[in-house]
Image (tube, grey):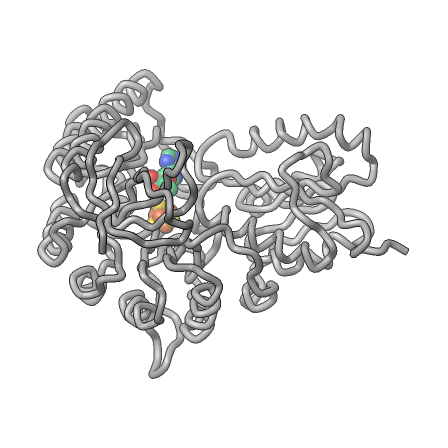
Amino acid sequence: MTDHSATPKKLFIKTYGCQMNVYDSERMAEALGTKGYVTTEVQDEADMVLLNTCHIREKASEKLYSDLGRLKALKTAKPDLKIGVAGCVAQAEGAEILRRMPLVDLVVGPQSYHRLPEMVEAKGKVVDTEFPAEDKFDHLPTRRALRGPTAFLTVQEGCDKFCAFCVVPYTRGAEVSRPVARLLAEARDLVSRGVKEITLLGQNVNGYHGEGAGGSWGLARLLRALADIDGLERLRYTTSHPNDMDDDLVAAHGDLPQLMPYLHLPVQSGSDRILKAMNRKHTAEHYLRLIERIRAVRPDILLSSDFIVGFPGESDRDFEDTMDLIRSVGFGAAFSFKYSARPGTPAAEKPELPAEVSDARLQALQALITTQQRAAQEAMVGREVGVLYEKPGRLDGQMMGKSDHLHAVHVIDPTAKVGDLVRVRITASSTNSLAGERLDS
Ligand code: 5AD
Ligand code: SF4
């Protein structure tokens, strides 16, 4: 018999993709902890390797298969090594992964992570890509060691929006919101263990409609309840759809001091023709008006977005409309992607643009965003902001933290500790971070 406590088994997790996957990887590590696994950063010493995959853009499955190919040598050297595939590629490909890669032992979709402990103990190969009725989070162990003063909290999963390019509604399934009471309890527990900032996660987080006292609660109501928790100093949420920014949520940005002045609000394109083809169900004008309403209640808010260039049928004019939208909003940050056809999505049926066209557009868009990002950073110089220290900096006595606006800030502050939330005056801006000096409170 194996004595788990005497010889802990080592688990190596590789996480691809979004924050949701980072969160899920942590929870899977905790679930496997119940079977005696401890995590390692060294793949070669692992007893189990888990690849937590992402399917959002192209080459995800090719990347998975080449990573699995590279694991062959390790499996040959250690025949007892368990290899698992989790995440959205697992969901999309299921048993096909076992067929193509016999070295894989288990395939688990994002809704079945709570079943991992049984799955690792099963004899033979197992696949679980169901969408079970129960909430996987109810069956995952309580959260253990924390990485610092910030934490993610998944409040919602799945998406009902069906943007024409996107696999999320297929891989993550329909929108499911976790009940309010559970989230408040989990948040209180995080705070009791030193967390000062919580980022609420969901594929369509502002579509949150969880069961709470008196019926269904929207995200704004949840944020207000979270803001009442003593010691919870900062709240953020991501990722949102413009059509789900209701009046209450906009108002919350004005009246909740804990809700930080940074909002990631993907628009994808500035052309109404393309937005329609993308099935986004909003126009550029609608987005611009929404930004005006948010800025009216929180003038210093920093905005970020996602853009796709080279969507099928995108003309030069359409692309210019996107550039115009960017110019009129002024973003503090943005993620931009070349359109990548995802099998099974409606847009994948349409002819693609030549790669050179998309490449050139992506470059132009990124150059514009970089200019805006620099300008937003420069505009912080001289201003006073809150900074939550996350780790020591590289210099002696230096701390690194995030500002209210999510900028990385370095401060020389020899007596400070990780987890301190301090007032800082920004003194300089460099490529990817700001420098500041601590103000006496
Ligand atoms: N091609 C390119 N980008 C995509 N995204 C989602 N699907 C695709 C695709 N098929 C981008 C969107 C989304 C972000 C998470 O990834 O911009 O907001
Ligand atoms: Fe995908 Fe976001 Fe559209 Fe949902 S709202 S389908 S997650 S791009």
Q: Is residue 270 visible?
A: no
Q: Position of residue 245 (x, y in %)?
A: 23, 58
Q: Residue furthest top?
A: 356
Using residue 316 as the reference point, say whether residue 296 is left or right of it.
left
Q: Nearer the viewer, residue 147 or 319?
A: 147
Residue 209 lies in what quarter of the image?
bottom left
Q: Residue at x 22, y 39 (%)?
A: 332
Using residue 306 as the reference point, say whether residue 104 is left or right of it.
right
Residue 374 lies in what quarter of the image?
top left
What is the tally of numbered marks visible in this picture?
A: 0
Relative to 138, residue 206 above or below = above
Q: Residue at x 66, y 59 (%)?
A: 115
For the N terminus, the quadrant is bottom right
Using residue 148 as the reference point, say whether residue 80 is left or right of it.
right
Q: Position of residue 45 (x, y in %)?
A: 73, 36
Q: Residue furthest bottom?
A: 214
Relative to 426, residue 281 above or below = below
Q: Residue at x 71, y 51 (%)?
A: 37
Q: Nearer the viewer, residue 295 or 193?
A: 193
Q: Position of residue 21 (x, y in %)?
A: 50, 47
Q: Nearer the viewer, residue 54 or 16?
A: 16
Q: Is residue 367 visible?
A: yes
Q: Nearer the viewer, residue 237 or 399?
A: 399
Q: Residue furthest front?
A: 415
Using residue 304 as the reference point, say whether residue 297 is left or right of it.
left
For the C terminus, the quadrant is bottom left
Q: Position of residue 372 (x, y in %)?
A: 18, 32
Relative to 355, residue 239 above or below = below
Q: Residue at x 83, y 36 (%)?
A: 79
